Amino acid sequence: MIGLDIGTTAVKAAWVHRKGDRFIVAGLARAGIDGASSSDDVAEKTSAAIHRCVYVLGRRKDVVCGLSGPDVAVRTFELPALPEKQLASAVELEAAQVCPFDLHEGAVAYQVLRGPSAKARRHAHQKAERTTGILAAAKKGVIERLRELCTRGETHCVTMDVDGLALLNCLEACAIRKPKETALVLNVGSAYTNLAIVSDDELPFVLDIACAGAGIVDHLARSTKAGREAVVAALEGSEESGIAPETLRSSLREACAPLAERVLQTMRYQGARKSGPGVDRVLVCGGLAQAQPVIETLGDLLDHQVEQWDPLTSLPCARAVCKSGLAERGPLFAVALGLAMRSVRDVQD
């Protein structure tokens, strides 16, 4: 299937082959969403971008879409060992207690990470053993909107995932996290930053932050009195942007401060809820990950080792992918790659 990362400014798509435990990147595509002036216009241009991506990847119809933002909630759970039907009901009750919206307006899916086997759960023999896992809930309106966009883009949305969990799926496939290491991944999109934390001994933690690329670029444009195009050029290292490097660096600290503060709050929260060392390493992907000044500024503000994460340096790629210009923009495709690695069997609902 194709992983489809539908953003606010572009659609990114990845086609991945599975060979045993290995994944091979067979195709990448990206199409911009530009010049939309109304909600209907946004929908039309987004569905057109979806169609272009799927056409580039050989007109394959089945896709996996990602969800993020305030209408999506991801939480971990720990429950007694229960038969499968009772477990599903217990997870839905758990979701109703922690989700910020009425579940009558939403849908819930879950995945068991640790606990008794499915056979043991069916018979509830192992009462002492507990079941831990992760649940995701999303408003039905958001789900239907994505399905409609895919239909208008001449694709079929087979299943959906959460962007933050797709990041962790891609990170696991890349096998770059060391044993006993706690990694924090930031996918800095245009409207939201997806944050995900994973370690050997803890359940994954996923959060969407409403501090992201568009806000950072707008802040830089105001503080430097330059246009957005000039700011983007300066972040990409262009000497013709008209923005002095010293001005850019000083403005970046202020522009990135809200995002850094939210990340630090999350680190403190995670440190308080578990014993042992905190985050060992921070990996940044997404649009702004290709701007080295942003990476350096986040490293200073977080006082952590911060590095750009390009999944394509760890995953084998088909020759066509290596020759494409998109191969040099690997940090943009982390979510799409993680989505493409999913199968319908991965999620119970």
Image (tube, rainbow, N blue to C red):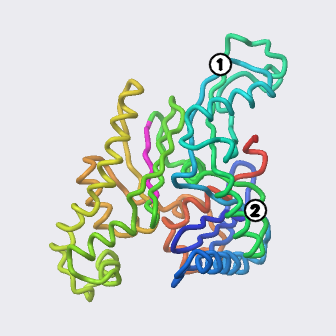
State the residue position of label 1: 130
Report the amino acid beneath label 1: Arg
Locate residue 284: give its quadrant: bottom left
Q: Magenta stretch?
A: 181-187
Q: Answer whether residue 182 is magenta in the image.
A: yes
Image coordinates of residue 309 in percent, x first then y, are 45, 59
Q: Answer whether residue 212 is magenta in the image.
A: no
| Label 2 packing within 10 angstroms: few (<14), some (14-19), many (20+) | many
Dominant secondary structure of the residues highlighted in magenta in the image: strand
Image coordinates of residue 11 in percent, x first then y, are 59, 72
| Label 1 packing within 10 angstroms: few (<14), some (14-19), many (20+) | some
Image coordinates of residue 19 in percent, x first then y, are 75, 55
State the residue position of label 2: 157
Image coordinates of residue 260 in percent, x first then y, are 31, 52
Report the amino acid beneath label 2: Cys
For marks 2 and 1, the one nearer the N-term is 1
Q: Residue at x 60, y 64 (%)?
A: 5
- In the image shown, does 186 or 156 lie closer to the viewer? 156
Q: Is residue 180 visible?
A: yes
Q: Residue at x 68, y 37 (%)?
A: 111
Q: Which secondary structure, mark 1? A: strand
Foreground: disc 2 or disc 1: 2
Task: Report the number of numbered marks.
Answer: 2
**3D distance between C-alphas at marks 2 and 1:** 34 Å
Q: Residue at x 26, y 89 (%)?
A: 240
Quarter that holds the N terminus:
bottom right
